C-alpha cells in the first residue's frame, strides 16, 4: 500500500534527522560569559524597543547612550570569547 505524499515527506525528514550526527553542546563556552551575554542581548533589545517609542529628545539621547554602551559591552565579550 502506497503512502501519501505528505506522510512520505515527514518520514523522509525523520530519516534525515536521524542520519545527521547529534550536535553536542559547546563545552568550551564559559557559562558565566554566556549568561552575561544573554543578559546584555536582552537589555539591548529592551532599549531598542524603548528607543523606538521615545519622543522626548533627552530620553532618546539617554537611550542611545545606553544602546552604545550595551553594544560595546557585547563587542568586548565577543573578542574575549574568541
Image (cartoon, rainbow, N blue to C red):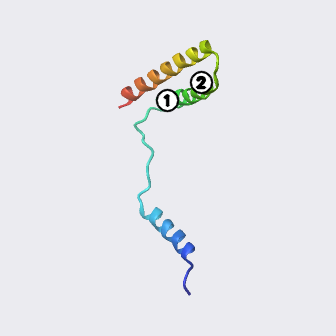
The label on residue 51 is 2
Q: Residue at x 53, y 31 (%)?
A: 38
Closer to us: 61 or 11: 61
Closer to us: 38 or 53: 53
> Residue 3, how many percent across, how many down?
55, 80
Q: Residue at x 52, y 71 (%)?
A: 9
> Residue 23, how many percent across, how many down?
43, 51
User: In which quarter of the view is residue 76 placed?
Assistant: top left
Disc 1 to disc 2, C-alpha distance: 21 Å
Circle 2 residues within 10 Å: few <14, some 14–19, many ≥20? some
Closer to us: 57 or 38: 57
Tell me the mark number nearer the camera, choosing from 1 and 2. Answer: 2
> Residue 18, how many percent across, how many down?
46, 64
Secondary element under disc 1, as helix, strand or loop, is helix
Q: Which residue is mark 1?
A: 37
Secondary element under disc 2, as helix, strand or loop, is helix
Amino acid at each position: 500500500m502506497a503512502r501519501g505524499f505528505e506522510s512520505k515527506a515527514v518520514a523522509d525528514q525523520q530519516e534525515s534527522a536521524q542520519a545527521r550526527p547529534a550536535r553536542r553542546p559547546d563545552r568550551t563556552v564559559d557559562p558565566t560569559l554566556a549568561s552575561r551575554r544573554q543578559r546584555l542581548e536582552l537589555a539591548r533589545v529592551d532599549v531598542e524597543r524603548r528607543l523606538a517609542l521615545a519622543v522626548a529628545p533627552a530620553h532618546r539621547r539617554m537611550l542611545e547612550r545606553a544602546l552604545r554602551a550595551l553594544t560595546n559591552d557585547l563587542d568586548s565579550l565577543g573578542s574575549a570569547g574568541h
